[in-house]
Image: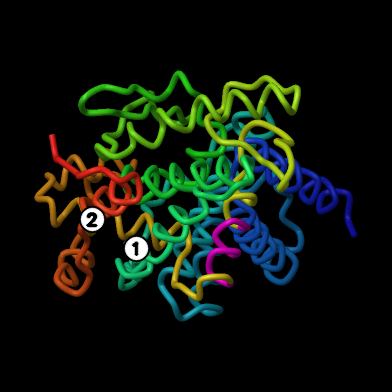
Amino acid sequence: MSNNFSSLLQLEEAFLVNLQDKGRSHNTIKNYRTDLLCFNRYLEEEKKGIELQRFELNHVQSYGGYLEKKYKADNSKRRRVQTLRVFFDFLVENGHYPSNPVRAILPSPKFLDIPRPTPFIDIKTLWTHLLDEERSNNPMVRLIARRNQLIVLLIFGGGLKVSDLAHLKKDHVFLEKNSRVMITQTDREPYTLPLPELFNAVYEKYLPDLQKMKEQSKLTFDEVLFHANPYQIISGGLSPRGLEIIFEEFRKKLMINLTPRSLRQACVFKWLQQKKKESLIKEWLGLAPSYSLKPFKDHLMDFLYNEESLAEYYFHYEGKNYRKN
């Protein structure tokens, strides 16, 4: 293995560690690693004499030709070019490269898959399960159930990603008549998302119980969510991988179709059915104005959602009548 190639592998590993530090999910990092392995194979097979520092636009175009021959799916080719673009951005930001040659080419169009949102019947199954768990005699089980209720409301109600949830702070949540949550990301200015009316009721019951358990566990932290075992809180915050594990447990236990992504897609359908403006939906999801919601609109009547019924279930369990404000 040449010194140049060894240096490339070290830079790629530093890039992946940087993604992990930013809270990217396990699956996202795995996909980036797979895409970089493809780039490494290209350098080995097609351009053995090219040093990374001399990688220029014509080599990017050559890599595009390599992908054309190797992959049939347009999205597979597009994703690998996008990974290379993000990797070179990292190199430029850290002084390893003067400018990003991949930015000189236009990204190929994204061919969108048919959305596969969580069916509403599965959301209701999960919600009633969490309401049952909230009535446990074990205070930690009750607290975890309320935490998981918040996760559902933040993703299905507010469209948050697992990376948004990982380090969500209490001062990012604004409880008002129309509650909102602030999202802070490295690549854009902070912005807020609307939350469902039910969020207030769940959150206001959750905070005092969270504080008691933090004191019992002798911990202090500002994050809304937490990592715990059945007996105590272990740490503040909940990593993307930790969130994925929670959803895996829901799928196995309740036999439902549920991932963070499918629940977030359900939120998009819900917003469209609520007649929210498309420009607002794209802004809330952090999407470019050019992004097309056509696949969602084409299947709008295939997946119907009623957010208010979650509130009705919740207040029924509380022995109260639900009244929409």
Q: Which residue sits at x=50%, y=39%?
A: 165
Crowdedness near tag 1: few (<14), some (14–19) or many (≥20) residues, C-alpha within 10 Å: some
Is residue 110 placed above or below 83 in the rendered structure? below
- Which residues fall within the magenta stretch? 245-252
User: Which quadrant of the rendered structure holds the C terminus?
Assistant: top left
Amino acid type of the residue tagged 2 in the rendering: Ser
Distance, label 2 to label 1, CA atoms, is 9 Å
Q: Secondary structure at mark 2?
A: helix
Is residue 63 placed above or below 8 in the rendered structure? below
User: Which quadrant of the rendered structure holds the N terminus?
Assistant: bottom right
Q: Position of residue 111 (x, y in %)?
A: 32, 68
Q: Position of residue 22 (x, y in %)?
A: 61, 36
Q: Secondary structure at mark 1?
A: helix
As drawn, is 169 to the left or to the right of 48? Answer: left
Q: Position of residue 235 (x, y in %)?
A: 71, 33
Amino acid type of the residue tagged 1 in the rendering: Lys
Q: Quadrant of residue 210?
A: top right
Q: Nearer the viewer, residue 71 or 213?
A: 213
Q: Nearer the viewer, residue 124 or 267?
A: 124
Is residue 220 placed above or below 297 in the rendered structure? above
The secondary structure that dominates the magenta segment is helix
Which residue is identified by label 1? 124
Residue contact between numbered discs 2 and 1, judged by CB atoms under 8 Å: yes
Residue 251 in the magenta stretch? The answer is: yes
Q: Which residue sits at x=26%, y=48%?
A: 311
Q: Nearer the viewer, residue 39 or 188?
A: 188
Which residue is identified by label 2? 309
Q: Which residue sits at x=19%, y=74%?
A: 302
Residue 73 in the magenta stretch? The answer is: no
